Image: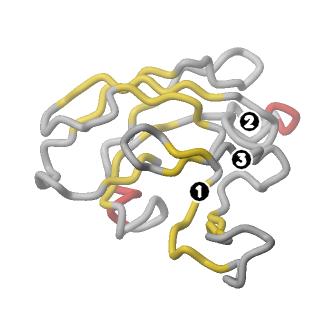
Amino acid sequence: ITQSGDGRLMASVDASGLRQGAAYLVCLDLDGLAGPLAFGDTGLRAFVTPITKVSPQAVPKHTFELSVACSDSSSGCHPRELGRLGVRAEAWLWLVDAAAGCGSSEGQAAGRTPLRVSPTDRVLWPAVASLDASRFSYGQALRLC
């Protein structure tokens, strides 16, 4: 752990062995191994994702272009391998209220934007989608599905 010039603590973590799509507790021992304080939960959570870059980082309250870059690893950023079953894979991107979640009825009815998919059923990264955030409120937490 290092301290930045503005007083924030920063840590570099190798998450390569963690499961993508899972949330993990962030634990910390504030005084190190030699101190009397115990190792414990900070109350913070870390979500492991194969997404490496999203632009823009703030969502405007209108239609906008979203660019998403991904590591496209075998466990994360491509549609299921359906080609062997003779079914064309599809990839979609949409916004929902963070509390509702991607599988909610709101998520199912949301304006989904198809992503470009190669002949081998792989999403072509970076993916660019036109999304409409006009139905959401200012300050509302959103989830990208």
Nearer the observer: mark 1 or 2; the answer is: 1
For mark 1, what is the residue? 47
Residue 14, horizontal then vertical, whole percent:
77, 44
Residue located at (61% from left, 17% from top): 124
Q: Residues within 10 Å of mark 2 (few under 14, many from 20)?
A: few
Displayed quadrant of residue 65: top left
128 relative position to 119: left or right: left
Work out whether residue 95 or residue 106 is closer to the camera in this orientation and state it: 95
Q: How far apart are marks 3 and 1 (CA)?
A: 12 Å
In this view of the protein, which residue sits in the foreground, 143 or 79?
A: 143
43 displayed left or right of 13: left
Residue 11 drawn at (x, y percent)? 62, 47
Residue at x 78%, y 38% (from the top left corner): 82
Q: Distance between the residues labelled 1 and 2?
A: 31 Å
Which marked residue is nearer to the observer: mark 2 or mark 3? 3
- In the picture, residue 40 is in which quadrant? bottom right
User: Label 2 is placed on what type of residue?
Assistant: Val
Q: How crowded is mark 3: few (under 14 residues within 10 Å), some or many (20 or more)?
A: few
Q: Mark number for residue 13?
A: 3
